[in-house]
């Protein structure tokens, strides 16, 4: 079974703190993703990585950065947390290019609910 | 600009009924359309997916209907069960030069409640 684990289920931080969210996958997936999920807004892509040390901005990268030093690990960094970053953060991973027509399935972790006070 | 529009936002269905969730897209370059299911406290999980070379795909009680000319696709859940109560997301993707549809654009989600 594919497993995507996230370091914390719940996290409470203060405004201005530097926050690290960690994600680890055990399926040797090339691609990893960070989303935030907010009621009524669905899933919005923050950043993704298609290889070690490679990253691309998603739809809402402002206020976030990422790090991928090892294939299995993808970190989301909030340089200076703000209250509008209170959200559910979801990590996902998938295979890279073409292993069949439906090989693009993304496997999600359980999420980290971050509250910034 | 919302590239994938999903409706309704919420849906209540009686046990045994048919649940229908609709999505519309704008970008004709999309060529992969998955549906994800999310239970409370869990991350989303792939339910069923379709490519535009077919108009329908069925897996058990779940069917995707795809209308390329209308740029619409929908999820039908037959004989809906209380265990189907979850949030459903449609998504769409463009295949990159490497043949991968790795970047998904999600709809805003539909909260389905199936009453016993």
Image (spheres, rainbow, N blue to C red):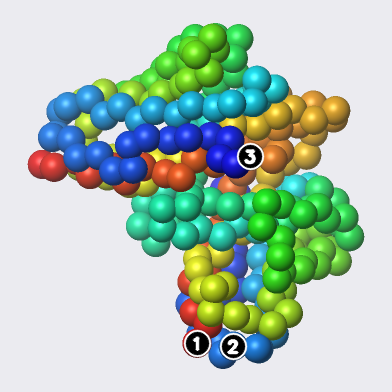
Residue B92 left/right relative to B72: right
Instruction: Find residue B104 and name its label.
Output: 3
Q: Quadrant where the N terminus of chain B lies?
A: top right
Distance from the alpha carbon under mark 3 to that under mark 1: 31 Å
| Location of residue B74 by image quarter | top left
List x then y, in percent, for residue A89: 56, 64
* Number of marks: 3
Disc 1, disc 2: CB below 8 Å?
yes
| Residue A83 sits above or below residue B84 on the image | below
Q: Nearer the viewer, mark 2 or mark 3?
A: 2
Q: CA distance from mark 1 to mark 2?
A: 6 Å
Q: Nearer the viewer, residue B46 or B54?
A: B54
Sort mark 3 into few (<14), some (14-19) or many (20+) by Cα contacts within 10 Å: many
**Residue at the (71%, 38%) spot, across then down:** B102
Residue A17, horizontal then vertical, whole percent? 66, 88
First-in-chain label (1 vs 2): 2
Residue at point 65%, 32% (across, down): B93
């Amino acid at each position: 079974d594919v497993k995507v684990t996230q370091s914390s289920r719940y996290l409470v931080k203060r405004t201005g703190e530097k926050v690290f969210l960690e994600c680890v996958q055990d399926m040797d997936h090339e691609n990893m993703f960070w989303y935030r999920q907010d009621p009524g807004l669905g899933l919005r892509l923050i950043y993704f990585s298609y290889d070690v040390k490679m990253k691309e901005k998603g739809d809402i990268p402002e206020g976030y950065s990422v790090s991928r030093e090892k294939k299995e690990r993808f970190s989301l960094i909030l340089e200076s947390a703000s209250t509008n970053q209170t959200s559910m953060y979801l990590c996902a991973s998938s295979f890279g290019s073409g292993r069949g027509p439906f090989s693009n399935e993304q496997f999600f972790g359980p999420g980290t609910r971050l509250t910034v006070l | 600009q919302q590239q994938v529009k999903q409706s309704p936002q919420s849906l209540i269905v009686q046990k045994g009924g048919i649940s229908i969730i609709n999505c519309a897209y704008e970008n004709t370059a999309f060529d992969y359309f998955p549906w994800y299911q999310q239970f409370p406290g869990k991350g989303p999980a792939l339910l069923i997916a379709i490519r535009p070379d077919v108009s329908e795909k069925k897996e058990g009680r779940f069917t995707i209907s795809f209308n390329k000319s209308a740029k619409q696709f929908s999820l039908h859940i037959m004989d809906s069960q209380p265990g189907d109560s979850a949030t459903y997301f449609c998504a769409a993707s463009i295949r990159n030069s490497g043949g991968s549809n790795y970047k998904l654009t999600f709809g805003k989600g539909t909260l389905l409640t199936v009453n016993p």
